Amino acid sequence: MNHKIAVIPGDGIGPEIVREARKVLDAAGKKFGFTLDYTELLMGGASIDVHGIPLTDETIAAAKASEAVLMGSIGGDAKTSPWYQLPPEKRPEAGLLKIRKALNLFANVRPAYLYEELKEACPLRDEIIGDGFDMVIMRELTGGLYFGERKTIEENGVKKAIDTLSYDENEIRRIAKRGFDIAMKRKKKVTSVDKANVLDSSRLWRAVVEEVAKEYPEVTLEHMLVDNCAMQLVRDPKQFDVILTENMFGDILSDEASMVTGSIGMLSSASLNETKFGLYEPSHGSAPDIAGQDVANPIATVLSAAMMLRYSLDLDEAADAIEAAVKQVLKEGYRTGDIMSEGCKKVGTTEMGDLIAQRV
Ligand code: NAD
């Protein structure tokens, strides 16, 4: 079976980490009998250098014509890069917002998984960590407070700022379905996070999530208030499987959840729409400080590629094999600089990619 994949290497360490992810994907393809047909696209600074803008309509069309997009990272050093002399709508990051909108990517999935071998990087106490945790945060990405009407006015000489938090039932239903679908591929538990004791939007959220839950009798649903969830993430992270939440709560909780895993170079992410299509990228940025030095950790991108196989291409077995290969490499003591600890073997970006690909 052949699959059409758009690849956006991007800026900084992007091309290096995407190259390693492709290496691992191709190894999985050989083992599991599929091929990937890659179309390389420009976005961010790389696109500005060629086209003068961070994202062209041709790039959007090519992304749409593929089954999934694998991305490195976009952006440069804001202090030194000429890209940041441009007006905000022409800077690298504008491309990112535009492609998410153009592809209708309303569901952001960020796993927070603690590897046994990287326990030392976790800031939580051993008795809280136990045998580790494995959750995903499913965040609504295109609605809520960040997209509502906003204004700043002056009333009787007093300045007043207004932001609007609104969700309609369709926006809630589609993200809830996505959350339950993902729970079905995992431990079958959804924790829906809201502030239903105060907010109308949260009360609607809760009602619609309960409606959707009826279509997934195998999945256990629980509701949790967002303040309690922020606390539970550091008190007992093991209790979570899929955390389903709206845009702003998800923004904050996903950063908290990633922090407790310890390393930015390990965190994958996916942004999905209503179809099987998705955009897969590491959670970290383009790290211009280490670009081109063969020291970047490619694992977040490799794991994002595994998510692509699982969620967009239904190649679950191959995704499992890639994740197991990453675990194996860590178990054997290989580390890039960002996750290095005493007694381990330090390797560069390329060697880490080779090691994972060999173990798929
Ligand atoms: P960053 O994530 O790029 O880097 C933060 C720190 O973590 C740096 O010290 C970097 O060297 C290190 N780091 C990041 N990824 C690593 C990896 N894989 N291996 C080893 N070390 C790694 O964040 P930043 O410095 O704030 O941003 C740099 C650029 O990336 C900016 O232009 C920013 O706008 C952009 N950015 C892009 C995205 C995206 O494309 N989705 C996300 C975040 C930031």
Image (tube, grey):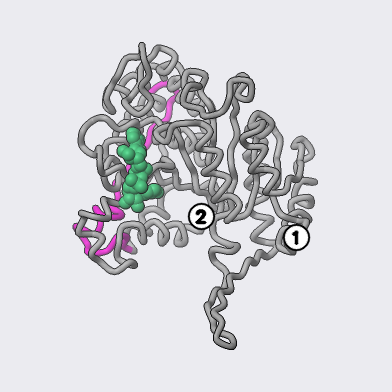
The residue drawn where x is 78% and y is 56% is: 197
Residue that sits furthest to the bottom in the current view? 156
Q: Report whether 41 appears left or right of 101.
A: left
| Residue nearest the viewer, comparing 251 with 55 | 251
Residue 174: horizontal and vertical position, in percent? 64, 54
The residue drawn where x is 32% and y is 14% is: 345
Residue type for callout 1: Val
Q: CA distance from mark 1 to mark 2?
A: 28 Å
Image: magenta residue range:
30-56
Residue 353: horizontal and vertical position, in percent? 32, 25
Q: Secondary structure at mark 2?
A: loop
Q: Secondary structure at mark 1?
A: loop
Mark 2 or mark 1, which is nearer the start of the sequence? 2
- Position of the N terminus, as image quadrant, is top left
> Which residue is the site of mark 2?
105
- 113 magenta-colored: no
**Do we see residue 73 in this rendering?**
no
Residue 86 lies in quadrant: bottom left
- Callout 2: 10 Å neighbours few (<14), some, many (20+)? many
Question: What label sits on residue 198 in the rendered view?
Answer: 1
Residue 355: horizontal and vertical position, in percent? 34, 19
- The reply to whether callout 1 and callout 2 are in contact (CB within 8 Å) is no
- Position of the C terminus, as image quadrant, is top left
| Residue nearest the viewer, comparing 33 with 221 | 221
Q: Report whether 267 appears left or right of 163.
A: left
Residue 347: horizontal and vertical position, in percent? 28, 21
Give above or below for 340 relative to 182.
above
The residue drawn where x is 70% and y is 44% is: 228
Does mark 1's beta carbon lie closer than 8 Å to ligand 1?
A: no
Residue that sits furthest to the front in the current view? 157
- Callout 1: 10 Å neighbours few (<14), some, many (20+)? few
Q: Report whether 202 appears left or right of 175.
A: right
